[in-house]
Protein backbone atom coordinates (compact mmCIF):
# COMPACT_ATOMS: atom_id res chain seq x y z
CA UNK A 1 0.00 0.00 0.00
CA UNK A 2 1.35 3.44 -0.98
CA UNK A 3 1.53 5.97 1.86
CA UNK A 4 2.12 9.62 1.03
CA UNK A 5 3.77 11.89 3.61
CA UNK A 6 2.13 15.24 4.53
CA UNK A 7 3.06 18.20 2.33
CA UNK A 8 6.21 20.22 3.22
CA UNK A 9 7.36 17.35 5.51
CA UNK A 10 10.04 15.88 3.23
CA UNK A 11 10.66 12.38 4.58
CA UNK A 12 12.48 9.80 2.50
CA UNK A 13 14.05 10.26 -0.91
CA UNK A 14 11.89 12.64 -2.93
CA UNK A 15 13.52 14.38 -5.87
CA UNK A 16 14.53 18.03 -5.89
CA UNK A 17 11.79 18.69 -8.46
CA UNK A 18 9.09 17.28 -6.19
CA UNK A 19 10.32 19.29 -3.22
CA UNK A 20 10.63 22.48 -5.34
CA UNK A 21 7.02 22.21 -6.48
CA UNK A 22 5.77 22.01 -2.91
CA UNK A 23 7.99 24.94 -1.87
CA UNK A 24 6.62 27.05 -4.74
CA UNK A 25 3.13 26.21 -3.56
CA UNK A 26 4.02 27.37 -0.06
CA UNK A 27 5.60 30.64 -1.31
CA UNK A 28 2.71 31.28 -3.69
CA UNK A 29 0.14 30.97 -0.89
CA UNK A 30 2.04 33.44 1.27
CA UNK A 31 2.66 36.10 -1.41
CA UNK A 32 -0.52 36.22 -3.50
CA UNK A 33 -3.24 38.52 -2.30
CA UNK A 34 -5.98 37.81 -4.88
CA UNK A 35 -8.15 35.02 -3.49
CA UNK A 36 -9.26 33.75 -6.89
CA UNK A 37 -5.68 33.58 -8.13
CA UNK A 38 -4.64 31.77 -4.95
CA UNK A 39 -7.24 29.06 -5.56
CA UNK A 40 -6.25 28.58 -9.22
CA UNK A 41 -2.55 28.55 -8.37
CA UNK A 42 -2.94 26.02 -5.57
CA UNK A 43 -5.00 23.70 -7.79
CA UNK A 44 -2.41 23.85 -10.58
CA UNK A 45 0.50 23.22 -8.23
CA UNK A 46 -1.32 20.38 -6.46
CA UNK A 47 -2.06 18.63 -9.76
CA UNK A 48 1.52 18.91 -11.02
CA UNK A 49 3.12 18.19 -7.64
CA UNK A 50 0.84 15.27 -6.86
CA UNK A 51 1.46 13.66 -10.25
CA UNK A 52 5.23 13.95 -9.95
CA UNK A 53 5.45 12.71 -6.38
CA UNK A 54 2.96 9.87 -6.77
CA UNK A 55 4.99 8.72 -9.79
CA UNK A 56 8.15 8.84 -7.71
CA UNK A 57 6.60 6.79 -4.91
CA UNK A 58 5.66 3.92 -7.23
CA UNK A 59 8.01 1.35 -8.70
CA UNK A 60 8.33 3.61 -11.77
CA UNK A 61 9.98 6.45 -9.95
CA UNK A 62 11.41 5.00 -6.74
CA UNK A 63 13.94 2.20 -7.37
CA UNK A 64 14.00 1.41 -3.66
CA UNK A 65 10.27 0.66 -3.48
CA UNK A 66 9.56 -2.73 -1.88
CA UNK A 67 9.04 -5.47 -4.44
CA UNK A 68 8.72 -8.62 -2.31
CA UNK A 69 7.12 -9.75 0.92
CA UNK A 70 10.59 -9.96 2.36
CA UNK A 71 11.26 -6.28 1.51
CA UNK A 72 8.02 -5.17 3.12
CA UNK A 73 8.57 -7.20 6.28
CA UNK A 74 12.25 -7.94 6.95
CA UNK A 75 12.94 -11.59 7.65
CA UNK A 76 14.94 -12.35 10.75
CA UNK A 77 16.42 -15.83 10.35
CA UNK A 78 18.85 -16.93 7.63
CA UNK A 79 19.85 -20.45 6.60
CA UNK A 80 22.12 -22.07 4.02
CA UNK A 81 21.41 -25.48 2.54
CA UNK A 82 23.95 -27.95 1.27
CA UNK A 83 24.89 -26.88 -2.23
CA UNK A 84 23.81 -28.94 -5.20
CA UNK A 85 26.35 -29.35 -8.01
CA UNK A 86 24.73 -26.44 -9.84
CA UNK A 87 23.22 -24.20 -7.17
CA UNK A 88 23.93 -22.52 -3.88
CA UNK A 89 20.62 -22.18 -2.01
CA UNK A 90 19.93 -20.00 1.01
CA UNK A 91 16.71 -18.75 2.53
CA UNK A 92 15.30 -16.46 5.18
CA UNK A 93 12.19 -16.96 7.28
CA UNK A 94 10.27 -14.61 9.53
CA UNK A 95 9.80 -16.50 12.80
CA UNK A 96 11.96 -19.10 14.56
CA UNK A 97 12.37 -20.55 18.02
CA UNK A 98 14.89 -23.16 19.15
CA UNK A 99 13.36 -25.95 17.08
CA UNK A 100 10.68 -24.69 14.65
CA UNK A 101 10.48 -21.93 12.04
CA UNK A 102 7.42 -20.56 10.24
CA UNK A 103 6.00 -17.55 8.48
CA UNK A 104 6.85 -15.73 5.26
CA UNK A 105 10.07 -16.79 3.62
CA UNK A 106 12.23 -16.03 0.63
CA UNK A 107 14.57 -18.46 -1.13
CA UNK A 108 17.67 -17.23 -2.95
CA UNK A 109 19.17 -19.44 -5.67
CA UNK A 110 22.70 -18.70 -6.83
CA UNK A 111 25.08 -20.27 -9.30
CA UNK A 112 27.30 -22.65 -7.32
CA UNK A 113 30.45 -21.51 -9.09
CA UNK A 114 30.03 -17.80 -9.81
CA UNK A 115 27.69 -17.13 -6.84
CA UNK A 116 25.62 -14.94 -9.17
CA UNK A 117 21.96 -14.65 -8.13
CA UNK A 118 19.76 -16.66 -10.50
CA UNK A 119 16.35 -16.21 -8.90
CA UNK A 120 14.40 -15.59 -5.70
CA UNK A 121 11.22 -17.47 -4.75
CA UNK A 122 8.72 -16.35 -2.11
CA UNK A 123 6.74 -18.59 0.25
CA UNK A 124 3.80 -17.45 2.38
CA UNK A 125 4.62 -20.04 5.05
CA UNK A 126 8.08 -21.62 5.02
CA UNK A 127 7.32 -23.89 7.99
CA UNK A 128 9.80 -26.53 9.13
CA UNK A 129 11.52 -28.24 12.02
CA UNK A 130 15.23 -27.51 12.23
CA UNK A 131 15.81 -31.27 12.46
CA UNK A 132 14.64 -31.52 8.85
CA UNK A 133 17.17 -29.09 7.37
CA UNK A 134 19.52 -31.89 6.30
CA UNK A 135 16.77 -33.76 4.41
CA UNK A 136 17.03 -31.79 1.17
CA UNK A 137 16.99 -34.73 -1.26
CA UNK A 138 14.00 -36.67 -2.52
CA UNK A 139 15.83 -39.73 -1.14
CA UNK A 140 15.16 -38.29 2.35
CA UNK A 141 11.40 -37.95 1.78
CA UNK A 142 9.83 -40.39 4.25
CA UNK A 143 6.09 -40.68 4.79
CA UNK A 144 5.00 -39.08 8.10
CA UNK A 145 8.58 -37.99 8.87
CA UNK A 146 9.86 -34.42 9.15
CA UNK A 147 10.46 -32.95 5.70
CA UNK A 148 12.86 -30.19 4.65
CA UNK A 149 11.62 -26.69 3.71
CA UNK A 150 13.53 -27.02 0.44
CA UNK A 151 13.79 -30.30 -1.48
CA UNK A 152 16.03 -30.63 -4.54
CA UNK A 153 15.41 -33.33 -7.14
CA UNK A 154 14.67 -34.05 -10.77
CA UNK A 155 10.86 -34.17 -10.65
CA UNK A 156 10.20 -34.30 -14.40
CA UNK A 157 13.16 -36.58 -15.25
CA UNK A 158 14.77 -34.22 -17.76
CA UNK A 159 18.22 -34.30 -16.15
CA UNK A 160 17.94 -30.89 -14.46
CA UNK A 161 17.51 -30.27 -10.74
CA UNK A 162 14.10 -28.90 -9.73
CA UNK A 163 12.91 -27.38 -6.44
CA UNK A 164 10.11 -28.04 -3.95
CA UNK A 165 9.52 -25.08 -1.62
CA UNK A 166 7.48 -25.60 1.56
CA UNK A 167 4.34 -23.48 1.61
CA UNK A 168 2.47 -24.34 4.79
CA UNK A 169 0.81 -27.48 6.13
CA UNK A 170 -2.04 -27.93 3.67
CA UNK A 171 -1.48 -31.63 2.99
CA UNK A 172 -3.63 -34.46 4.28
CA UNK A 173 -4.02 -34.51 8.08
CA UNK A 174 -2.14 -31.22 8.35
CA UNK A 175 0.91 -32.60 6.57
CA UNK A 176 3.49 -30.45 4.76
CA UNK A 177 2.61 -28.95 1.38
CA UNK A 178 4.98 -27.75 -1.34
CA UNK A 179 5.12 -25.51 -4.37
CA UNK A 180 6.96 -27.34 -7.17
CA UNK A 181 9.28 -25.38 -9.45
CA UNK A 182 10.65 -27.02 -12.61
CA UNK A 183 13.85 -25.71 -14.15
CA UNK A 184 13.25 -24.09 -17.55
CA UNK A 185 16.52 -24.64 -19.41
CA UNK A 186 15.59 -22.22 -22.21
CA UNK A 187 15.04 -19.29 -19.84
CA UNK A 188 17.44 -20.44 -17.10
CA UNK A 189 14.70 -19.98 -14.49
CA UNK A 190 12.54 -22.09 -12.17
CA UNK A 191 8.86 -22.06 -13.16
CA UNK A 192 5.92 -23.02 -10.94
CA UNK A 193 4.23 -26.28 -11.99
CA UNK A 194 0.58 -26.15 -10.95
CA UNK A 195 -0.05 -29.84 -11.68
CA UNK A 196 2.91 -31.12 -9.64
CA UNK A 197 2.16 -28.58 -6.89
CA UNK A 198 -1.31 -30.12 -6.67
CA UNK A 199 0.23 -33.56 -6.06
CA UNK A 200 2.46 -32.11 -3.32
CA UNK A 201 -0.48 -30.34 -1.66
CA UNK A 202 -3.44 -32.73 -1.72
CA UNK A 203 -1.66 -35.83 -0.37
CA UNK A 204 0.37 -36.91 2.68
CA UNK A 205 3.35 -34.61 2.31
CA UNK A 206 5.88 -34.42 -0.51
CA UNK A 207 5.71 -37.13 -3.16
CA UNK A 208 8.55 -39.63 -3.54
CA UNK A 209 10.63 -39.90 -6.71
CA UNK A 210 12.05 -43.07 -8.30
CA UNK A 211 14.73 -41.95 -10.75
CA UNK A 212 15.35 -45.48 -12.05
CA UNK A 213 11.72 -46.18 -12.93
CA UNK A 214 10.99 -42.47 -13.61
CA UNK A 215 7.93 -42.53 -11.37
CA UNK A 216 6.38 -40.18 -8.82
CA UNK A 217 4.45 -41.79 -5.94
CA UNK A 218 1.85 -40.16 -3.69
CA UNK A 219 0.03 -41.47 -0.61
CA UNK A 220 -3.37 -40.58 0.85
CA UNK A 221 -5.62 -42.03 3.53
CA UNK A 222 -9.01 -41.80 5.20
CA UNK A 223 -8.88 -42.80 8.85
CA UNK A 224 -7.00 -45.82 10.11
CA UNK A 225 -8.01 -48.42 7.59
CA UNK A 226 -8.25 -46.92 4.09
CA UNK A 227 -5.07 -46.11 2.15
CA UNK A 228 -4.36 -45.15 -1.44
CA UNK A 229 -1.06 -45.19 -3.30
CA UNK A 230 -0.79 -43.57 -6.75
CA UNK A 231 2.07 -43.67 -9.25
CA UNK A 232 2.64 -41.18 -12.06
CA UNK A 233 4.82 -40.82 -15.11
CA UNK A 234 5.69 -37.26 -16.15
CA UNK A 235 4.93 -36.50 -19.80
CA UNK A 236 5.67 -33.01 -21.15
CA UNK A 237 6.06 -31.81 -17.54
CA UNK A 238 2.55 -33.10 -16.66
CA UNK A 239 1.87 -36.05 -14.28
CA UNK A 240 0.01 -38.97 -15.87
CA UNK A 241 -1.35 -41.59 -13.49
CA UNK A 242 -0.26 -45.15 -14.35
CA UNK A 243 -1.15 -47.18 -11.25
CA UNK A 244 -3.43 -46.97 -8.18
CA UNK A 245 -3.55 -49.28 -5.16
CA UNK A 246 -6.41 -48.96 -2.63
CA UNK A 247 -6.20 -51.00 0.59
CA UNK A 248 -9.58 -50.94 2.30
CA UNK A 249 -9.83 -52.64 5.69
CA UNK A 250 -12.68 -50.42 6.88
CA UNK A 251 -15.39 -53.05 6.50
CA UNK A 252 -15.86 -52.96 2.74
CA UNK A 253 -16.19 -56.75 2.68
CA UNK A 254 -18.68 -58.86 4.60
CA UNK A 255 -16.09 -61.50 5.53
CA UNK A 256 -14.59 -61.03 8.98
CA UNK A 257 -10.82 -60.66 8.87
CA UNK A 258 -10.85 -59.82 5.16
CA UNK A 259 -10.14 -56.60 3.29
CA UNK A 260 -10.75 -55.23 -0.19
CA UNK A 261 -7.81 -54.60 -2.54
CA UNK A 262 -8.44 -52.44 -5.61
CA UNK A 263 -5.81 -51.94 -8.31
CA UNK A 264 -5.94 -49.71 -11.38
CA UNK A 265 -3.37 -50.04 -14.17
CA UNK A 266 -2.90 -47.91 -17.27
CA UNK A 267 -3.42 -50.15 -20.31
CA UNK A 268 -3.51 -48.68 -23.83
CA UNK A 269 -4.26 -45.25 -22.46
CA UNK A 270 -7.07 -46.39 -20.12
CA UNK A 271 -7.09 -47.35 -16.41
CA UNK A 272 -8.22 -50.97 -16.00
CA UNK A 273 -9.61 -51.79 -12.52
CA UNK A 274 -9.43 -55.11 -10.66
CA UNK A 275 -10.83 -55.81 -7.18
CA UNK A 276 -10.36 -58.76 -4.83
CA UNK A 277 -11.04 -59.79 -1.24
CA UNK A 278 -8.00 -60.99 0.70
CA UNK A 279 -7.28 -62.18 4.20
CA UNK A 280 -5.77 -59.35 6.26
CA UNK A 281 -3.54 -61.85 8.00
CA UNK A 282 -2.13 -63.13 4.72
CA UNK A 283 -1.91 -59.66 3.16
CA UNK A 284 -0.02 -58.02 6.01
CA UNK A 285 1.88 -61.17 6.94
CA UNK A 286 1.66 -63.43 9.99
CA UNK A 287 2.11 -61.36 13.16
CA UNK A 288 4.58 -63.55 14.99
CA UNK A 289 6.44 -62.05 17.92
CA UNK A 290 9.75 -61.58 16.12
CA UNK A 291 11.08 -58.13 16.92
CA UNK A 292 12.36 -57.54 13.38
CA UNK A 293 8.85 -58.03 12.01
CA UNK A 294 7.56 -55.09 14.06
CA UNK A 295 9.62 -52.62 12.02
CA UNK A 296 7.53 -50.04 10.15
CA UNK A 297 5.23 -47.04 10.47
CA UNK A 298 1.86 -47.26 12.20
CA UNK A 299 -1.03 -44.90 12.84
CA UNK A 300 -3.97 -44.56 15.22
CA UNK A 301 -6.62 -41.80 15.03
CA UNK A 302 -9.10 -40.36 17.51
CA UNK A 303 -11.97 -38.03 16.55
CA UNK A 304 -14.86 -36.49 18.46
CA UNK A 305 -18.41 -36.82 17.19
CA UNK A 306 -19.46 -33.21 17.73
CA UNK A 307 -18.91 -30.30 15.35
CA UNK A 308 -16.36 -28.86 14.96
CA UNK A 309 -14.52 -32.17 15.05
CA UNK A 310 -11.46 -32.48 17.29
CA UNK A 311 -8.90 -34.98 16.00
CA UNK A 312 -5.68 -36.53 17.31
CA UNK A 313 -3.29 -38.58 15.17
CA UNK A 314 -0.74 -40.98 16.73
CA UNK A 315 2.18 -41.84 14.43
CA UNK A 316 4.38 -44.70 15.65
CA UNK A 317 7.66 -45.33 13.83
CA UNK A 318 9.75 -48.41 14.65
CA UNK A 319 13.17 -48.19 13.01
CA UNK A 320 15.23 -51.06 11.59
CA UNK A 321 16.95 -51.93 14.85
CA UNK A 322 16.88 -55.58 15.95
CA UNK A 323 16.69 -54.53 19.59
CA UNK A 324 13.83 -52.06 18.96
CA UNK A 325 15.70 -49.26 20.73
CA UNK A 326 14.81 -46.63 18.12
CA UNK A 327 11.10 -45.83 18.33
CA UNK A 328 9.40 -42.49 17.77
CA UNK A 329 5.84 -41.58 18.68
CA UNK A 330 4.36 -38.31 17.37
CA UNK A 331 0.94 -37.17 18.55
CA UNK A 332 -0.65 -34.19 16.79
CA UNK A 333 -4.12 -32.76 17.04
CA UNK A 334 -6.35 -30.43 19.01
CA UNK A 335 -4.12 -28.42 21.39
CA UNK A 336 -1.56 -31.25 21.22
CA UNK A 337 1.95 -31.75 19.88
CA UNK A 338 4.03 -34.54 21.41
CA UNK A 339 7.37 -35.85 20.13
CA UNK A 340 8.38 -38.92 22.11
CA UNK A 341 11.46 -41.13 21.82
CA UNK A 342 10.92 -44.65 23.18
CA UNK A 343 12.22 -48.20 23.30
CA UNK A 344 10.44 -51.55 23.30
CA UNK A 345 10.49 -54.61 25.51
CA UNK A 346 9.21 -58.03 24.42
CA UNK A 347 6.73 -59.59 26.87
CA UNK A 348 5.28 -62.89 25.70
CA UNK A 349 3.30 -62.24 22.51
CA UNK A 350 3.29 -58.48 23.14
CA UNK A 351 5.67 -55.56 23.03
CA UNK A 352 5.75 -52.78 25.66
CA UNK A 353 6.54 -49.26 24.45
CA UNK A 354 8.73 -47.61 27.11
CA UNK A 355 9.26 -43.84 27.39
CA UNK A 356 12.84 -42.65 26.93
CA UNK A 357 12.74 -38.87 26.34
CA UNK A 358 11.03 -35.98 24.57
CA UNK A 359 12.67 -34.57 21.46
CA UNK A 360 13.83 -30.95 21.54
CA UNK A 361 10.66 -29.42 20.13
CA UNK A 362 8.46 -31.10 22.78
CA UNK A 363 8.76 -29.25 26.09
CA UNK A 364 6.13 -31.29 27.95
CA UNK A 365 7.15 -33.32 31.00
CA UNK A 366 4.23 -35.74 31.16
CA UNK A 367 6.27 -38.94 31.44
CA UNK A 368 9.40 -40.15 33.17
CA UNK A 369 12.12 -42.33 31.68
CA UNK A 370 11.09 -45.97 32.06
CA UNK A 371 7.31 -45.33 32.05
CA UNK A 372 5.42 -47.99 30.08
CA UNK A 373 3.22 -45.95 27.73
CA UNK A 374 1.23 -48.88 26.32
CA UNK A 375 1.68 -52.42 25.09
CA UNK A 376 0.96 -53.75 21.61
CA UNK A 377 -0.34 -57.16 20.55
CA UNK A 378 -0.63 -58.39 16.95
CA UNK A 379 -4.17 -58.83 15.63
CA UNK A 380 -5.50 -59.29 12.11
CA UNK A 381 -6.12 -55.57 11.57
CA UNK A 382 -2.85 -54.27 13.04
CA UNK A 383 -1.50 -53.80 16.57
CA UNK A 384 -3.97 -53.84 19.45
CA UNK A 385 -3.26 -51.11 22.04
CA UNK A 386 -3.36 -51.86 25.77
CA UNK A 387 -3.07 -48.41 27.41
CA UNK A 388 -0.76 -48.03 30.44
CA UNK A 389 0.75 -44.73 31.58
CA UNK A 390 -0.46 -43.05 28.40
CA UNK A 391 -4.21 -42.75 28.03
CA UNK A 392 -6.30 -41.87 24.95
CA UNK A 393 -8.05 -38.52 24.72
CA UNK A 394 -11.51 -40.08 24.33
CA UNK A 395 -13.19 -42.32 26.88
CA UNK A 396 -14.56 -44.62 24.16
CA UNK A 397 -11.01 -45.63 23.13
CA UNK A 398 -9.78 -46.66 26.59
CA UNK A 399 -10.81 -50.26 26.07
CA UNK A 400 -9.78 -50.45 22.40
CA UNK A 401 -7.50 -48.99 19.78
CA UNK A 402 -5.63 -50.35 16.78
CA UNK A 403 -2.37 -49.11 15.30
CA UNK A 404 -2.63 -49.80 11.55
CA UNK A 405 0.54 -50.44 9.59
CA UNK A 406 1.18 -47.68 7.05
CA UNK A 407 4.50 -48.83 5.64
CA UNK A 408 7.30 -51.28 6.33
Image (tube, helix red, strand yellow):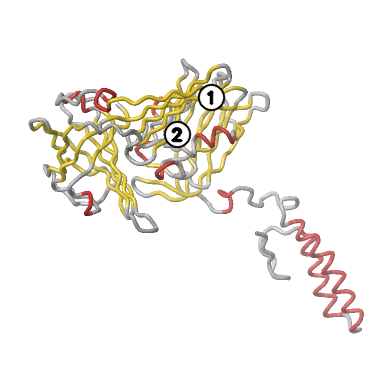
Q: Position of 42 compared to 98: left or right?
A: right
Name the residue nearer the viewer: 318 or 396. 396
Furthest-left residue in view? 348
Q: Are marks 2 and 1 in contact (CB under 8 Å)?
A: no
Q: Position of residue 388 (x, y in %)?
A: 13, 46
Q: Position of 8 compared to 163: left or right?
A: right
Q: Secondary structure at mark 2?
A: loop
Q: Secondary structure at mark 1?
A: loop
Q: Residue at x 43, y 30 (%)?
A: 136
Image quarter (top left, top right, bottom left or bottom right) of the N terminus: bottom right
> Neighbour class for label 2 at 10 Å: few (<14), some, many (≥20)?
many
Q: Position of residue 325 (x, y in %)?
A: 17, 31
In the rendering, which numbered label is found on residue 83? none
Residue 192 in which image quadrant: top right
- Front label number (2 vs 1): 2
Q: Position of residue 302 (x, y in %)?
A: 29, 48
Name the residue nearer the viewer: 288 or 189. 288
Mark found first going from the N terminus, 2 or 1 = 1
Q: Residue at x 39, y 58 (%)?
A: 308
Q: Position of 119 compared to 34: left or right?
A: left
In the rendering, which numbered label is found on residue 206? 2
Which residue lies under the disc numbered 1?
161
Residue 134 in which image quadrant: top left
Q: Position of 36 compared to 250: left or right?
A: right
Image quarter (top left, top right, bottom left or bottom right) of the C terminus: top left
Q: Is residue 394 above or below residue 200?
A: below
Furthest-front residue in view? 254
Residue 197 in which image quadrant: top right
Q: Is residue 290 above or below residue 395?
A: above
> Neighbour class for label 1 at 10 Å: few (<14), some, many (≥20)?
many
Mark 2–mark 1 distance (CA, rounded to whole Å): 16 Å
Q: Residue at x 47, y 49 (%)?
A: 103
Amino acid sequence: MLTLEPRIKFKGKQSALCQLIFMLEFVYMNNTRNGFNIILGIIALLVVGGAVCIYENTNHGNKEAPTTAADRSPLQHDFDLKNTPDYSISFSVKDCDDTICSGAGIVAIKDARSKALIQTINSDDLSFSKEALAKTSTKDTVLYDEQSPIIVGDFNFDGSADLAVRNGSNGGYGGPSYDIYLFDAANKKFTLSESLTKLATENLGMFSVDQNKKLITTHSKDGCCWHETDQYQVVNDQPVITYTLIEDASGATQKEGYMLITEKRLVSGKLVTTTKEVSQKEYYGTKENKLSEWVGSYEFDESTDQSPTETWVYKLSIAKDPSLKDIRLDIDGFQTMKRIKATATSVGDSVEIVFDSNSQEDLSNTYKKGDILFSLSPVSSGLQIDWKKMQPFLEKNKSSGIFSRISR
